Amino acid sequence: MNNRLVKSGFKAFALTSVLALGIAGCASSTTESASTEEEDTSAETTEEAPAEDGLRIAIMPKAINIGYFSAWDEGAQKACEELGASCDYIGPNEATGPAQVQFINQVIQEGYDALVISAADQNAIVPALEEAAAAGITIVTSDADVAPEAADARLVSILPSAADRIGTAEVDWVAEEMGEEGSVAILSAAATAANQNIWIEAMGPYLEETYPNMSWAGGSLESAVFYGDDDPTKSVEQFNAILAQYPDVGGIIAPTTVGVLAAAQEKKAKGVDVAVTGLGLPSEMAPYIEDGTITKVGLWNPIDLGYVGVYAAVLGHNGEFDGSVGSTFMAGETSYEVVDGGIAFLGDPFTFTIDNIATFKEIY
Ligand code: RAM
């Protein structure tokens, strides 16, 4: 029933574009992270061809060690190369607002021209972003936005697709596997992450209205949500906390690549009888789809998300795009339009099953 979410036209386009990106590779990047661990404190720099007159852009993930963001950065670096920009992949080891703020301050101090950021916390980073904007830095959120009331803190937000499509699709995936019966819990990222929160909000009423024999664990959406903070260890702990609190839970939706990977690993390790689905990176989820631990996960193309974010930032910085509702910009061959809320959407998520995982796992 969720097939309506996979439009063949989009699928063909995205696959082609991803393959093209994959072949082109990326030119230069700097990786920096804040950590007390020795190996993480040093900045690793491979500057092959820094742009002479090009812009200097910071590409900041929620946390630098999440595989999804490596794919996002791959797209960003590809756009940087096409646009002659010099781009540094920089950010914290833990996906929290305060940790990101330290790096935003560094971006201000070092006088970057633009910042493309996935907000780990929809509120905590806003003052730092405002300071950055006041210093002339063009800000684009990509993947996860700031709170709607703080939309003026950035030029535009590049998001995968409308929240309700992502949220309701995940409910359909878990329902399909549970035979449309039983209770469901959610293993999310951080309680402060705008992207997961808007998807979860859309899941709540949809499950109740669409599946009369299904319910949220504990009786309400609120009681069903657990937060693993996009940290692998905490996500495993929270997976087990769900099972301890709701031993009869029939399904777990993890709308985070970190959470769904942790859930699949732990489901397999413990041999737990619970349906697990969510938003998974095909390259990380392939072993669990191939061995039958998981039947289906979905995701958009994070490479495209990073790519489009950099185009918006560069065009915005150069005064060729103002981010207003109704305005458009080109990223590569594709035109994007800004809709209400100052957002440009990428397209619908793909689903990955045993039928296509072999192809997708090679791409991202
Ligand atoms: C994790 C992050 C990211 C989200 C994906 C689905 O990698 O939380 O923000 O978009 O999952």
Image (spheres, grey):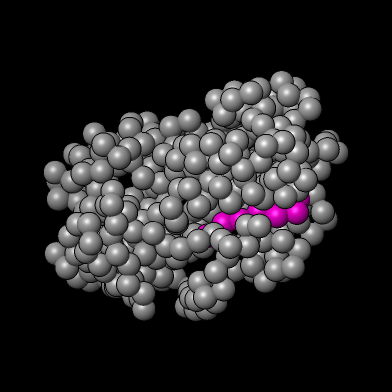
| 7 to 59, vertically: above or below | below
Q: Residue at x 72, y 61 (%)?
A: 353
Could you say which is closer to the camera, residue 250 or residue 281?
A: 250
| 15 to 205, vertically: above or below | below
Which quadrant of the structure image shows residue 267? top right
Regarding residue 264, the answer to whether it shows in the image is no
Is 350 colored magenta in this rendering?
Answer: no
Q: Position of residue 183 (x, y in %)?
A: 71, 32
Left or right relative to 26: residue 250: right
Q: Position of residue 191 (x, y in %)?
A: 48, 30
Which quadrant of the structure image shows residue 313? bottom left
- In the image, which residues are magenta? 294-300
Q: Quadrant of the C terminus?
A: bottom right
Q: Position of residue 66 (x, y in %)?
A: 54, 48
Q: Residue at x 39, y 35 (%)?
A: 121
| 97 to 76, vertically: above or below | above
Q: Residue at x 62, y 52 (%)?
A: 280
Regarding residue 351, the answer to whether it shows in the image is yes
Q: Residue at x 25, y 38 (%)?
A: 150
